[in-house]
Amino acid sequence: MIRQIVINMLIVCISLALALMLLEVIIRVAGTVDSDGQFSFLGYTLEPYVLPINRLKEGIDAYLHNVDTATILYDQRTGWTYRPNSLRHQGTFTVNSSGMRSQYEYSIDPLPDTLRIAAFGDSFTAGDDVNDDQVWTNQLELALRQQGMRAEVMNFGVGGYDMGQAFLRWGAIGQQFQPDIVIFGFQPENLDRNVNVFRILYIHGPSIPFSKPRFIVSNGNLDLINAPALPPERMVATFEAFASHPLAAYEDYYRSRDVVSKWWLSSRLGAFIYQLTKAQEGGGEADYGPASERGKVGKAIIDAFAADVVERAADFFVVHLPLPQHVAHIHNGGQSPYRYLLDYLRETYRYIPFDESLGPEYLDEKYWGPTGHYGAEVEALLGQTVAEAISACIEERSCSTQRFDDPAQFAIDT
C-alpha cells in the first residue's frame, strides 16, 4: 500500500512537472520578443525588464529622418510640442500657427469685449478622439455664447503631457495670450507621468522618443531637472550609459534596477504568473497620498501653476478628467486612489468634478473613442459642465475677470 501511494505521488509530481514544462514551452513559443530582447505575452510585458535602447534608436532615427514633416516636435522647454500649422489624426485635428489646437488664429492681445479662456493639459484636454468642432473647448465656447457671453476658448493641450509640462507650456507660450480664465485639465494618470523623465520607459510599444523636464520637491521647494530637455541626438548615448547617468535617479520607471534579485523570473511561466498576480492586486498601485512623491509633486505643481495664473490677473479653474477605467472603478464601488488630491482641489480651487457628471450609463464603450478618450457626446457634456461652472462664477461675481469691471462688457447684445 505504501509503495502504491509513493508511486501515485510520483506520477502526480511528474505529471505536474510535465504540465509546467509544457506551459513554459507554450509561453515561450507564443510570446514575442522586441528588438531589445524584451519579452511579452498576451499583452503583458514580463520581467526581467530591459532598457529599450534599440527601440529608442529606431524612434530617434525615424524622427530625425522625418523631422521636416513630423507633427510632434522636440521642444527643449516642454520635451515635445505640436508642429505649428499642421494637421493630425487624418486631418481631423488642426494645429494653428501658435501650436495650439484650433482652426483659428488668435492675436496676442485679447479683444476688449470678449472673455478669453485658455485650457492646458494632456490629450484629454486636446481631445484626441474627436474632430475640431467636437472637442470640448469648442463646445465650451459655443455653450458660453448660447448663455449670452462673448467668449473665445484656446486649447493648449498636448498629448502625452504630464502636469508639469502643462504648467511649463503655460509659461512658454500660454501666458503671453493674457487669458482671463485658465483651466487646468487634471487627468489623474499624470501623477504617474510626473515621476517619469523618458517617455519610452513609461510606455512599452510605440511612443514619443523624447525626454521631458521633470519637477521634484526638494526641501519644500519645487525644482526642475532635465531643463532644457535632452535633445534627440543625445538620447541614445544617454541610454547606453543609463545606470550612471544623473537622471536615472529621478526616473521612476527605470525598472531594470529592481529585478536583479528575482532569479526565478528566468522562467517565462513564473514571470507571467507574477505579472498576473500584480494585476489582480491592482498592478502594484502607487501611493498618491500626501506623504508620497506623486502626491507631493502633483500638489506642488498645481499650487505653483495657480499662483502664477493669479499673479497675472487671471482666474484659475481645475477640471477633473477621469479615464474610462476610473469611471468604471467608482461605479463598481471602488475608492479613488487619488482622493487626497481630489479633496485638496475641491477645498482649495475652483474645482469642476466632471466625474460626477458621468453616470453609470457612460460605462458603455459607445461613449468613448477608439484610443480611450472621450467621444463626441462626452466632449459636449464636458463643455456644457465647464460652461455652467464658469457662468455661475461670473453671475456670483466671485470670478476675478479683472479686465472687466462688469460682466455686461462681454455680454452678447440681444
Image: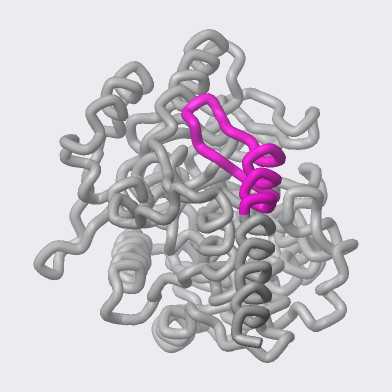
Q: Position of residue 200 (x, y in %)?
A: 46, 38
Q: Is residue 349 a member of the stretch shown in magenta?
A: no
* Vertical position of residue 247 compared to residue 262: above or below: above
Is residue 111 visible in the rendered image? The answer is: no
Q: Is residue 25 a member of the stretch shown in magenta?
A: yes
Image: magenta residue range:
21-42
* Vertical position of residue 247 compared to residue 185: above or below: above
The quarter of the displayed image where residue 252 is located: bottom left
Left or right: residue 224 versus residue 69 is left
Is residue 145 visible in the rendered image? The answer is: yes
Q: Position of residue 399 (x, y in %)?
A: 50, 76
Q: Residue furthest left?
A: 219
Left or right: residue 44 versus residue 380 is left
In the image shown, does 239 or 37 lie closer to the viewer?
37
Task: Quarter of the image for the C terminus: give it.
Answer: bottom right
Q: Position of residue 76 (x, y in %)?
A: 33, 30
| Residue at x-position 72% and y-position 77% | 328
In the image shown, does 269 or 193 lie closer to the viewer?
269
| Residue at x-position 64% and y-position 73% | 7
Q: Position of residue 75 (x, y in %)?
A: 40, 29
Left or right: residue 189 versus residue 360 is left
